Image (cartoon, helix red, strand yellow):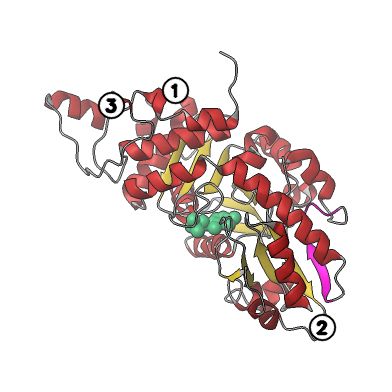
């Protein structure tokens, strides 16, 4: 069969999985429990000898349909979805790592992931933060007990782009799990599998859902990591194809034990949202490019951070790897211009902390999402006190530019 396009595959995936009554959207199944005519079948499902549903915390048919869509988007082998993006990251790490293990992480991280890794340090999992825009920095941090390297595609809010291809090759040569948070690019702009990632993480709350009306997170196994070489897989999960050992442990230990499971209603909202991912992202990226170019020549703007500008330090890398430059753009204002005054003068742009929404949202990062981190760590991440992060939406670009003109005047 010829390979279908990204949208075609997504739009027809529920229908092709033999749904009830020929429905085009997988139904929302609220049932927590599942009954079996033959109790032996129930036992076989428990023992992993037969596919089936047991209890809503582990899986639900509406959730399965969403997992299938994400797996197809990432061209992976399996996906586990969770109640939020943070739940996906935390549950994956807690199921695969043990005290005494070491993670090398990008220093340029989503604030809550940074906070989570601090918690891991207190639980006996070592974390070294490095400048992941350069593979040399990652390489020099690797130790005997390193198990995993974690990076984001485009980092928040300064938009640094990790040396994804270099780190992928390094992880392959050292046999390390390479976990890429693909939230800021989404599988429409980038598939981490293309640079050798073992896992792609997506906060479904952001671009994939896109409408800002449901939380969710996903971890997709790309099929590239050799799980037979990984010391932390429990014997119980080795009774099947070794490609599935890692994701099975994430589903068992992560979903079953930790229980940050995605509900069927949210799964439905996210699946419907995902149908328009590429259309929304193309429009948002195009708008962001125009807004970034406008800001770059404005006298009240000291600095613009956007990978689509030729002056961005990793512009060439972004162009080579991504199918677009994303819709997150940050600016530093010149001294004497107050970020709160600028935000309050905007009409169409909302002061709000989400990103990847259809609406344009903006936030003064040092005073909000990066406040708890403290001034020193903020400075090391290149976050200034006047920085505003914009998640550009799909409005008509003229209306966005009008807001910038007015607010910066
Ligand atoms: C938002 C976000 C997350 C966390 O996702 P939630 O669904 O909000 O828990 C993780 N990584 C990145 C890069 C994000 O932007």
Ranked by sequence position, the earlier of labels 2 and 3 is 3
Is any part of residue 153 visible from this angle?
no
Where does ligand 1 appear, by image quarter?
bottom right
Q: Does the residue at mark 1 contact the one at mark 2 (Cβ under 8 Å)? A: no
Q: Quadrant of the C terminus?
A: bottom right
Tag shown at residue 241: 1
- Label 3 CB sits under 8 Å from any ligand 1 atom: no
Q: How many marks?
A: 3
Q: Does the magenta stretch include residue 243?
A: no
Q: Relative to 404, does residue 33 appear above or below in the rendering?
A: above
Q: Which of marks 1 and 3 is in front?
A: 3
Cα–Cα gap, marks 1 and 2: 59 Å
Q: How crowded is mark 3: few (under 14 residues within 10 Å), some or many (20 or more)?
A: few
Q: Where is residue 229 in the image (x, y as percent from the top left)?
A: 55, 31
Q: Is residue 305 magenta?
A: yes
Q: Does the residue at mark 2 contact the one at mark 3 (Cβ under 8 Å)? A: no
């Amino acid at each position: 069969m010829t390979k279908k396009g990204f949208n075609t595959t997504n739009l027809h995936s529920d229908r092709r999985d033999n749904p009830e009554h020929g429905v085009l959207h997988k139904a929302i199944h609220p049932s927590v429990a599942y009954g079996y005519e033959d109790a032996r079948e129930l036992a076989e499902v428990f023992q992993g000898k037969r596919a089936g549903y047991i209890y809503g915390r582990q899986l639900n048919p509406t959730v399965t349909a969403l997992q299938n869509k994400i797996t197809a988007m990432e061209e992976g082998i399996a996906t586990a979805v969770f109640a939020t993006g943070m739940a996906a990251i935390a549950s994956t790490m807690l199921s695969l790592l043990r005290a005494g293990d070491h993670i090398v992480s990008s220093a340029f991280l989503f604030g809550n992931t940074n906070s989570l890794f601090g918690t891991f340090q207190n639980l006996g999992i070592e974390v070294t933060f490095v400048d992941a825009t350069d593979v040399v920095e990652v390489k020099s941090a690797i130790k005997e007990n390193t198990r995993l390297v974690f990076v984001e595609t485009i980092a928040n809010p300064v938009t640094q782009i990790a040396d994804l291809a270099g780190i992928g090759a390094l992880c392959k040569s050292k046999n390390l799990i390479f976990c890429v948070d693909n939230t800021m690019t989404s599988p429409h702009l980038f598939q981490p599998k293309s640079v050798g990632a073992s896992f792609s993480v997506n906060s479904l709350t952001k671009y994939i859902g896109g409408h800002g009306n449901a939380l969710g997170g996903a971890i997709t196994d790309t099929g590239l990591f050799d799980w037979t070489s990984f010391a932390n897989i429990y014997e119980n999960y080795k009774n099947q194809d070794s490609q599935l050992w890692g994701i099975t442990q994430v589903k068992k230990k992560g979903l079953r034990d930790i229980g940050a499971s995605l509900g069927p209603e949210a799964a439905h909202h996210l699946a419907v949202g995902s149908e328009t991912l590429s259309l929304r992202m193309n429009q948002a990226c195009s708008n962001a490019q125009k807004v970034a170019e406008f800001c770059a020549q404005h006298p009240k703007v000291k600095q613009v951070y956007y990978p689509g500008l030729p002056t961005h330090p990793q512009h060439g890398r972004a162009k080579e790897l991504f199918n677009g430059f994303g819709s997150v753009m940050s600016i530093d204002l010149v001294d004497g211009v107050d970020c709160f005054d600028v935000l309050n003068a905007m009409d169409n742009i909302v002061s709000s902390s989400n990103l990847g929404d259809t609406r344009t949202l903006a936030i003064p990062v040092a005073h909000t999402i990066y406040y708890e981190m403290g001034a020193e760590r903020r400075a090391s991440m290149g976050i200034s006190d006047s920085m505003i992060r914009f998640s550009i939406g799909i409005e008509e670009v003229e209306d966005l530019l009008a807001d910038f003109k007015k607010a910066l005047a």
